[in-house]
Image (cartoon, rainbow, N blue to C red):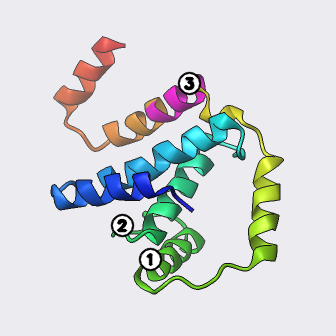
């Protein structure tokens, strides 16, 4: 469950007209902090980001499903539906099982180097859609 402050900051961003991905960034940031604090872990930085995005959708951020596998799109649709409907009580057994499983995971997914590596690889993926001029300029920088 995201903290009240995070939800308020995301709602504030929504009122300011910021994009859903900007609103969801608050949830991802909170997730990274949780992993660093040792509240739980994640196998990879991608998983940590995915958990944050899922929490954002469940909190009501209108974040569309990614162009990914069928299973991922279905999970995103489920999270969006959960965000629209009133809260139902979460099964205690399932909640405890998920927490225990995440606690067994690594905490290195939220390290500075892991986050940098993730940011650079996603930037490289995005570079494919940019103009040749923009690509050569970014290549000159490093």
At 19% across and 36% down in the image, what residue appears? 131
Q: Any magenta on residue 117?
A: yes
Using residue 133 as the reference point, say whether residue 57 is left or right of it.
right
Cα separation, mark 2 vs mark 3, equals 27 Å
Image spot of residue 70 (x, y percent) = 55, 74
**Of callouts 2 and 3, the N-terminal one:** 2
Q: Residues within 10 Å of mark 1 (few under 14, many from 20)?
A: some
Give SS at disc 3: helix
Can residue 122 be seen here? The reply is yes
Cα separation, mark 3 vs mark 1, equals 31 Å
Report the front residue among 33 and 62: 33
Residue 101's place in the image compared with 112, above or below, is: below
Q: Which residue does the numbered mark 3 point to in the structure image?
A: 112
Chain part drawn in magenta: 113-119
Residue 61's place in the image compared with 131, above or below, is: below
Image spot of residue 64 (x, y percent) = 36, 68
Report the front residue among 14 and 67: 14
Say which of marks 3 and 1 sits in front: 1
Image spot of residue 139 (x, y percent) = 32, 19
Q: Which residue does the numbered mark 2 point to in the structure image?
A: 61
| Quadrant in which the N terminus appears | bottom right
At 16% across and 55% down in the image, what residue appears? 16
- Picture quadrant of residue 37: top right
Can residue 21 be seen here? The reply is no
């Amino acid at each position: 469950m995201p903290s009240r402050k995070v939800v308020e900051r995301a709602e504030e961003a929504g009122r300011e007209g910021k994009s859903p991905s900007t609103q969801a960034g608050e949830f991802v940031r909170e997730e990274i902090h949780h992993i660093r604090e040792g509240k739980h872990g994640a196998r990879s930085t991608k998983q940590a980001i995915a958990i944050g995005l899922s929490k954002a959708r469940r909190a009501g951020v209108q974040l569309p499903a990614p162009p990914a596998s069928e299973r991922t799109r279905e999970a995103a649709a489920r999270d969006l539906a959960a965000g629209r409907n009133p809260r139902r009580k979460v099964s205690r057994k399932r909640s405890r099982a998920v927490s225990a499983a995440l606690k067994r995971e690594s905490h290195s997914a939220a390290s500075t180097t892991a986050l940098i590596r993730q940011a650079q690889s996603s930037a490289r993926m995005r570079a494919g859609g940019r103009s040749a001029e923009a690509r050569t300029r970014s290549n000159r920088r490093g």
